Amino acid sequence: MDISGVITARKALFDEYLDRYLGEARTASGIFEAFAYSLQAGGKRIRPVLAMLACEAAGGGAAHALPAGLAVEMIHTFSLIHDDLPALDNDDLRRGRPTCHRRFGEATAILAGDALIFQALSVLCAAPYPAQVKVDLCTFLAEVCGTNGLVQGEHEDVMAEGRDVPLDTIEGIYGRKTSRLFEFCLYAGARVACEDAALTRALALYGTHLGHAFQAIDDILDVTSDSRTLGKSAGKDIAQSKATVVKVLGLDGARSWAQNATDRAVQALDGIGGQGTHTLREIARWMLERAM
Ligand code: GRG
């Protein structure tokens, strides 16, 4: 299977949809300019792609997951803008461009990030999904972002800087700051396509383990790659003494840890058949090898 072809095609569908959305939503404001700058800066779009693939695995068409994918990419972009702020990671480079606060100033970046959260909810509420599906998506999105998700994970990540923390603490941080949003992507793609709760749960669990592997590879690349390839500052984890699996296990140990998480992701799909889950298995293996 040409897995990069599968990803490229879904990414192109998403980028077209995003451009259309921004064309229609455009306002003559500094906030909108910063908001669109960060959303259109590129990025792998792996989260919307996963939502589309989950939708396909659950019997729907990829395009049906686009509003859910856009909402999740907005939340992800918001989290990157805020993560890059001086009070958090204080970064200058993101997606190959100056970070939002470097380009527009800190106040505008904070507010553009805030706007992305609310626009994400607005996109979900306006989506052509049944009312109950929209309620389920908004409810779950709030859960994975809140005090048992993204925000909590980011706080734990910042608090763990410079400290010696055990592996299970790092697993908890990865789970909340990265995996919960992956879990949401898979959940959302399945939820908009079907009413099969067991299938939706299995896909969401795949997303959880995949998120762990993804974050571990992100941390490995921070050490082994360079800023030009990654489009963001490499080498920061060691400089800031971040709590990562690389710090605790070394590079080889971190690779095995990512491999185990990938195996668990693939196992979560056991018993589910179809071409769609075959693609998800392939993508999990492909992600282990990613170079950016
Ligand atoms: C209020 C929802 C909310 C969050 C605020 C700032 C913050 C709390 C959370 C940030 C968490 C964070 C930065 C996690 C890192 C996850 C990660 C691996 C990001 C990189 O993702 P890629 O590689 O980036 O998919 P691209 O640019 O390709 O989209």
Image (cartoon, grey):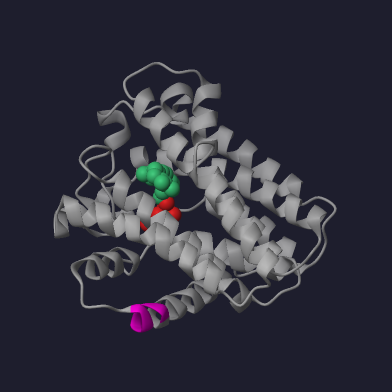
Residue 253 in sight in this render = no
Predominant secondary structure in magenta?
Answer: helix
Residue 207 relative to residue 102: left or right: right
Which residue is at 74% across, 56% downward?
A: 200
Q: Is 195 placed above or below 201 here?
A: below
User: Which percent across, then down, holds residue 189?
Assistant: 64, 64
Task: Please state which of residues 232 and 62 is positioned toward the viewer in this rendering.
Answer: 62
Identify the image quadrant of residue 220. Answer: top left
User: Which percent across, then down, holds residue 49?
Assistant: 55, 66
Asked if the magenta segment contains residue 70, the reply would be: no
Which residue is at 52% across, 38% downward?
A: 176
**Farthest-out residue, right:** 271
Q: Is 53 placed above or below 165 here?
A: below
Q: Quadrant of the N terminus?
A: bottom right
Q: Is 72 placed above or below 90 here?
A: below
User: Which percent across, then down, holds residue 92?
Assistant: 19, 49
Residue 71 relative to residue 92: left or right: right
Task: Please state which of residues 226 and 218 is positioned toward the viewer in this rendering.
Answer: 218
Q: Is 78 placed above or below 160 here?
A: below
Residue 165 relative to residue 198: left or right: left
Asked if the magenta segment contains residue 23, the reply would be: yes
**What range is drawn magenta here?**
21-25
Residue 81 in sight in this render = yes
Q: Quadrant of the C terminus?
A: bottom left
Task: Please state which of residues 193 and 163 is positioned toward the viewer in this rendering.
Answer: 193
Q: How many marks?
A: 0
Which residue is at 28% across, 59% downward?
A: 112
